[in-house]
Amino acid sequence: MTHAFYSDAAEKARADLSPRERAAVEDIRISLESDPGRGEEVPDSGPGSSSYVVELLPEETGGRGISILYRYDRALDAALITYLVAGP
């Protein structure tokens, strides 16, 4: 099972989300533990890892649209959520 964590920056951003938005983001974090290649792959400069973005629509969050950027390392079998970007 893959482990999925929040970076310090993502944790701080998560604190600014509404409870429903935070729950939607946490659902994605949990889903990454069973499906770490979820989302659209984005350019990544690190060897041995891949970066992805998962887009949550306002209908899914009950508030704003949120982009979740994370990096998955196969050797560590771990995903690090690096950024959360919430729309207006």
Image (cartoon, rainbow, N blue to C red):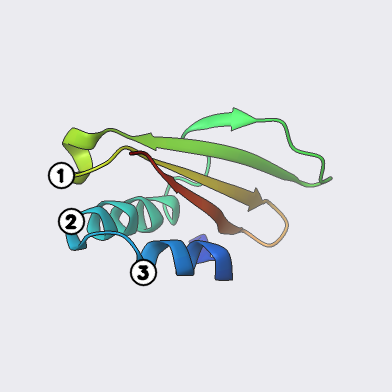
Residue that carries the numbered disc 1 in the rendered image: 62
What is the x, y in percent for residue 20?
Answer: 18, 56
Residue 53, placed above or below residue 49: above
Q: Position of residue 63 (x, y in %)?
A: 20, 44
Query: Could you classify mark 1 by the number of other residues whose Cα lies within 10 Å: few (under 14), some (14-19), or many (20 or more)?
Result: some
Marked residue nearer the N-terminal end (1 or 2): 2
Residue 38 visible, this orientation: no
The first of marks 2 and 3 along the sequence is 3
Q: Residue at x 73, y 57 (%)?
A: 75
Given this view, does label 2 or label 3 mark the residue nearer the observer? 3
Neighbourhood count class around disc 3 (C-alpha, 10 Å): few under 14, some 14–19, many 20 upward = few
Disc 2 designates what residue? Answer: 20
* Percent of width and height locating residue 53: 51, 37
Q: For the residue labelled by badge 2, is the local secondary structure a helix, a strand or a loop?
A: helix
Q: Which residue is drawn at the image coordinates 26% and 51% (left, top)?
A: 24
For residue 76, say whether it is visible: yes
Residue depicted at 74% across the width and 37% down the height? 44
Q: How far apart are the two marked residues, 1 and 3, measured between alpha carbons?
A: 16 Å
Q: Secondary structure at mark 3?
A: helix
Which residue in the structure is indicated by mark 3?
A: 15
Q: Amino acid at mark 3?
A: Ala
> Residue flagged by tag 2: what amino acid is it?
Arg
Distance from disc 1 to disc 2, alpha carbons, whole Å, reads 6 Å
> SS at mark 1?
loop
Instruction: State the image coordinates of residue 49 (x, y, percent, origin top left).
Output: 73, 46
Q: Is residue 84 left or right of residue 60?
A: right
Q: Quadrant of the C terminus?
A: top left
Q: Is residue 5 above or below residue 87?
A: below
Mark 2, other Cα within 10 Å: few <14 / some 14–19 / many ≥20: few
| Residue type beneath disc 1 | Gly
